[in-house]
C-alpha cells in the first residue's frame, strides 16, 4: 500500500536537535517512509490512499518504552482486554516490554525465565494488536543465569534483559549479570527507586552506577523515587538512558528533565508510561507526560515529542521513531483539541493541554483517520480524500 499524507501544517522529525521539517507532505510505500516534506505530484497521484491532514501536525508514532505486556492484548494486573489497541488511539505505535513479570505464576528459575522471554518474543513477532508493534521478550535477571544463557537468547532473537525483580540478596548481585547480558548484545534495563514488589529493596544511584545498564527504568520512580541527589550523579557519571514514566513521581520527572537539559544529556532522556500497573491502563499516558514536561519545565513541546519517539528509537535501536525516508511508516496526526484556547498541537502541549489525534498510521497502514476514540476531538478535520483499498478508516464508534 502507498499512502500520501498531504496538507500538513507542521512536521516533527523525531530529532530533538533539529525537530521541525519544512514542507507539507509525507509519502509511504509498503510500510516505509519514502519522502518527508515535499513530494512530486506524481507520487501523490500514485498513492492508494490520500489523507488530507487539513493543516494538522505530523509526528512519528509514539514509542512507549515501558509497557507491562504479558501475552496477547490482555493485562492480568488490570483484568483488561484490548488495552494495546486502545493505546494506538493514544498515538502509540510501538510498545516495548518492561519484561513479562505480570504473567500469572511467572517462572523464577533459569530455564523458566529464558523460556518466558523467548515465548513472549515469538508471540509478538508478527502479532500487532490494533496495529501496535510490540517488542516483547525481556529476560528477567535471576541468579544462575550465565553468559552462555544470554548468548543463547540473543541468538534466538531476544533483545532485552531486565534487572530488578530477581531473587538476589542485594541489587549489587546484578552487576555481573548485567555485564554478561550486555556482552551478549542484550539491551539491559534496571528498575529504579523504591521497590514496587514487597521484599525487594530500593535501587538507587549507587546501584545504577555500579551496574550501568543501558536504561534506568522509571528514573523518576516506579512509582517511588530515589533520592534527589542521585539524579545529577547518574546524569554526570554515566551514559545511561533516563526513562521518565507517567506512573512515577512528577516532581522528580521535572527535576530529571531539567538536569538533562542543563547537562547536555537530552539524547538520553526517553519517555514511557510504566503501565498497565497498579496505576492503571493509560492510553493517553505518553501525551500526558509530554504535556507535563513541556508545560511545567518551559522546554519546547517538540523536544519532548522527540524524547518520546526518536530518543526511544535510538536507545532501543528501532527502525521507527523518526519521520525520514527509509524509516518505518509510523505516523500520527496531532492537533490542538477542539474547544481549547490554542491553535496548533505544539501550542496546545506547551499550554499543558492533551493534544488531539486525527489519524494513526502504523507499518504504512492507516489504523484510523478522523477521530481517536480516546483523545478530545481535533480542531481540524483529517479525512481520506481518495482510496483504492477496501477499508473505511473510521475509528470504532464510541
Ligand atoms: Zn514497570
Image (cartoon, helix red, strand yellow):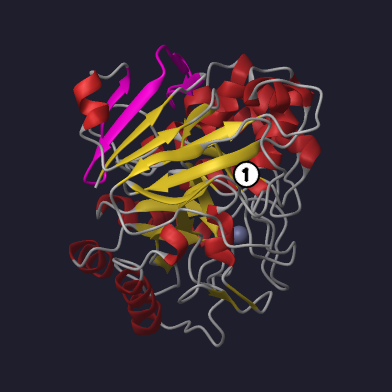
The one of 253 and 294 positioned closer to us in this rendering? 294
Residue 164 appearing in the image: no
* In the image, residue 6 lies in the stretch drawn in magenta: no
Residue at position x 41%, y 45% in the image: 361
The quarter of the rendered structure image containing the C terminus is bottom right
Please give left or right for residue 360 compared with residue 110 in the image.
Answer: right
Quarter of the image where ligand 1 sits = bottom right
The one of 341 and 139 positioned closer to us in this rendering? 341
**How far across and how far down the image is residue 189, in percent?**
47, 52
* In the image, residue 25 lies in the stretch drawn in magenta: yes
**How far across and how far down the image is residue 119, in percent?**
33, 77
Residue at position x 40%, y 14% in the image: 23
Residue at position x 73%, y 56% in the image: 194
Rendering quarter of residue 177: bottom left
Residue at position x 57%, y 52% in the image: 89
Residue 180 appearing in the image: yes
**Label 1 Cα crowd, 10 Å radius (few <14 / some 14-19 / many 20+):** many
Please give left or right for residue 229 compared with residue 332 in the image.
Answer: right
Q: Which residues are magenta?
A: 10-37
**How far across and how far down the image is residue 371, in percent?**
60, 47
**How far across and how far down the image is residue 12, in percent?**
48, 23
Please give left or right for residue 117 compared with residue 239 in the image.
Answer: left
Q: Is residue 49 above or below residue 130?
A: above
Rendering quarter of residue 334: top right
The one of 93 and 116 positioned closer to us in this rendering? 93
Q: Which residue is mark 1?
A: 286
Amino acid at each position: 500500500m502507498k499512502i500520501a499524507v498531504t496538507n500538513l501544517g507542521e512536521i516533527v522529525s523525531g530529532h530533538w536537535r533539529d525537530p521541525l521539517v519544512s514542507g507539507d507532505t509525507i509519502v509511504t510505500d509498503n510500510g516505509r517512509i519514502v519522502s518527508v516534506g515535499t513530494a512530486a505530484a506524481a507520487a501523490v497521484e500514485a498513492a492508494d490512499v490520500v489523507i488530507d491532514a487539513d493543516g494538522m501536525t505530523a509526528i512519528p508514532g509514539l514509542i512507549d518504552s515501558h509497557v507491562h505486556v504479558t501475552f496477547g492484548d490482555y493485562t492480568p494486573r488490570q483484568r483488561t482486554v484490548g488495552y494495546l489497541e486502545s493505546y494506538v488511539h493514544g498515538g502509540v505505535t510501538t510498545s516495548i516490554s518492561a519484561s513479562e513479570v505480570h504473567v500469572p505464576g511467572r517462572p523464577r528459575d533459569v530455564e523458566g525465565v529464558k523460556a518466558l522471554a523467548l515465548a513472549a518474543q515469538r508471540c509478538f513477532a508478527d502479532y500487532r494488536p490494533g496495529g501496535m508493534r510490540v517488542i516483547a521478550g525481556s529476560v528477567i535477571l535471576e541468579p544462575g543465569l550465565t553468559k552462555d544463557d544470554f548468548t543463547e537468547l540473543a541468538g534466538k532473537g531476544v533483545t532485552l534483559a531486565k534487572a530488578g525483580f530477581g531473587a538476589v540478596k542485594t541489587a549489587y548481585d546484578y552487576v555481573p549479570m548485567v555485564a554478561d547480558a550486555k556482552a551478549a548484545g542484550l539491551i539491559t534495563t534496571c528498575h529504579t527507586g523504591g521497590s514496587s514488589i514487597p521484599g525487594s529493596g530500593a535501587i538507587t544511584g549507587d546501584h545504577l552506577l555500579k551496574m550501568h545498564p543501558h536504561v534506568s527504568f522509571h528514573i523518576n520512580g516506579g512509582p517511588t523515587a530515589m533520592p534527589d541527589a542521585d539524579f545529577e550523579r547518574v546524569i554526570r557519571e554515566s551514559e545511561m538512558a533516563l526513562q521518565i514514566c507517567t506512573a512515577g513521581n512528577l516532581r522528580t520527572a521535572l527535576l530529571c528533565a531539567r538536569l538533562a537539559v542543563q547537562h547536555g544529556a537530552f539524547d538520553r532522556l526517553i519517555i514511557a508510561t510504566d503501565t498497565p500497573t497498579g496505576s492503571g491502563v493509560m492510553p493517553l499516558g505518553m501525551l500526558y507526560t509530554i504535556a507535563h514536561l513541556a508545560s511545567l519545565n518551559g522546554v519546547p513541546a517538540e523536544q519532548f515529542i522527540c524524547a518520546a519517539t526518536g530518543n526511544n528509537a535510538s536507545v532501543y535501536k528501532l527502525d521507527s521513531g523518526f519521520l525520514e525516508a527509509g524509516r518505518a511508516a509510523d505516523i500520527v496526526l496531532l492537533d490542538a483539541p477542539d474547544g481549547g484556547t490554542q491553535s496548533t498541537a505544539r501550542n496546545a502541549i506547551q499550554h499543558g493541554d492533551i493534544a488531539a489525534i486525527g489519524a494513526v498510521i502504523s507499518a504504512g497502514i492507516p489504523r484510523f483517520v478522523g477521530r481517536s476514540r480516546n483523545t478530545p476531538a481535533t480542531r481540524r478535520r483529517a479525512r481520506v480524500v481518495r482510496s483504492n483499498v477496501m477499508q473505511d478508516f473510521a475509528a470504532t464508534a464510541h
